[in-house]
Image (spheres, helix red, strand yellow):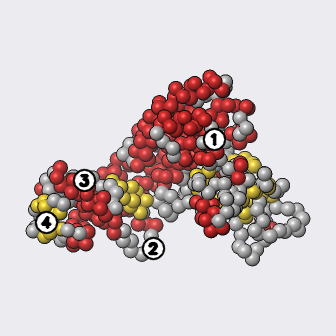
Amino acid sequence: MGGAANSRLRISALPGGQRGVLFDQASSCQTFEAESPLIRVPSPLVITAATAKQSEVVRSCCACAGDSSEALQIALFVLTERARGTASDWHWYINMLPASGAGALFLDDMALEALTGTPLRMAADAKLRHLRKQHNSFRQILDAWKTTADAPGSIDFEEFKWATFIVLSRTVSLQSCRALADEQNSQCPNAEDDRALVPLLDMLNHSSEPLARWSVDSDGAVSVFLNVPADSTRSDVARDSAMELTFSYGLKPNTEWVYEYGFMPERNSHDAWPYFTPLSGSPSFVDIKRMWMLELGLTPRVMLSDPGRHRGTYTLPRSTMLSLCLAALDDTSDACLQQIGPIALAYPLFEVRSFLVDSDVKLLQIPNLRKYALVLCSRCLARQASTMQTSLDSYSQLRLPDFSSSAQQQYDTVTNYLAAELVTVRRIAD
């Protein structure tokens, strides 16, 4: 199939219980070109939506759910191939995957209670509701398939949740493949797909200073390289007896890290807090504000970056300020009346103190509105911080000796997340 692997690579247990891919330093003076791949995974071994949709049961389930997303197709493929057991052509790969799930979808009731009011809890609740609805929609199809295929494995909701976790935590984007296919006018097998499970690549752990990088070849194969300068050699880098190959999972806020992977980096310089801007006011004014948000391309959720991560003075993006200002205006609020002035509706526009607001520029020119919007946001964040502090104090009192290793890991993740986000929210609020 055109694949390649290096004899100096091995999968090994690491301190802390996780696995990693190690690159052994050659005992001889062996050197080779930096652009030679350590691993090359041929296109037929890259699991994409195109792979998944070859399965009749996957196609039937997606049609029943009314959802043909790549994520669902790959999750259903992994679910059904795992259920096939040793009869599956992908048994070798399924066996390499984690046997159990992690992340927000697998938090226990105590952890979820401690996370009440956080974006992580809201995301977990919403995703679980969505997954239950999906699974219920095609459960009968899966049951019939299991009987016909004589599949020994389970296809219940917990297994579907596990398959979704695999997609969340282990798929990569093949957008570079699309760009390459367009550029070279090649017949790249994965040109129509984005998300993919790539064996071996998905076993590399994350690092902000990765020792490996990957790319998609014109034939759809995925190659993994040592991440070294162009004028260097691999032996120049691999000075130890063995080093762990890592690559970057991307720049994400803490909520996304815990939601997708079940952990977060110790020092995340890209943390941000999702703030939901309520559209308050009379029903007519709320309709106007919704129309404005649609016209301006705004969303009810804005991401507030941790100001402690920025050098010098940090300025909110203009779109964020527009969302906060729209949310702050309320024609039924006495506080808004006192701070901003009376609001008169002139659909689809409105006036503030007889000042016609007919553009986003004029919205930001309303006297005192920016300051008032930031005060309201700060007060809301302070309340959220207070709630998190209470939750953290309560959750921290749990008796650790009674915990299993997995429960201990979850406890550490939740307490670390709450502590980190508490710092972030307080910085933003200040």
Seen at 82% across and 61% down, the residue is 25
- Residue 350, image quadrant: bottom left
Q: Nearer the viewer, residue 154 or 408?
A: 154
SS at mark 3? loop
Residue 341 in the figure: left or right of residue 91: left
Q: Nearer the viewer, mark 2 or mark 4?
A: 4
As shown in the figure, which amino acid type bears the numbered disc 4? Answer: Val
Q: Which residue is mark 2?
A: 311
Q: Earlier in the sequence, mark 2 or mark 4?
A: 2
Q: Which residue is mark 3?
A: 279
Residue 267 in the figure: left or right of residue 125: right
- Vertical placement of residue 349 versus 394, above or below: below
Quote the CA–CA distance across marks 3 and 1: 45 Å
Seen at 78% across and 51% down, the residue is 1
Q: Which residue is mark 1?
A: 54
Q: Earlier in the sequence, mark 1 or mark 2?
A: 1
Tell me residue 383's x, y (percent): 30, 51
Quote the CA–CA distance across marks 2 and 3: 32 Å
Q: Nearer the viewer, residue 376 or 346?
A: 346
Q: Earlier in the sequence, mark 3 or mark 1?
A: 1
Q: Are marks 3 and 1 in contact (CB under 8 Å)?
A: no
SS at mark 1? loop
Seen at 67% across and 31% down, the residue is 84
- Vertical placement of residue 352 versus 44, above or below: below
Q: Which residue is mark 4?
A: 352
As shown in the figure, which amino acid type bears the numbered disc 1? Answer: Gln
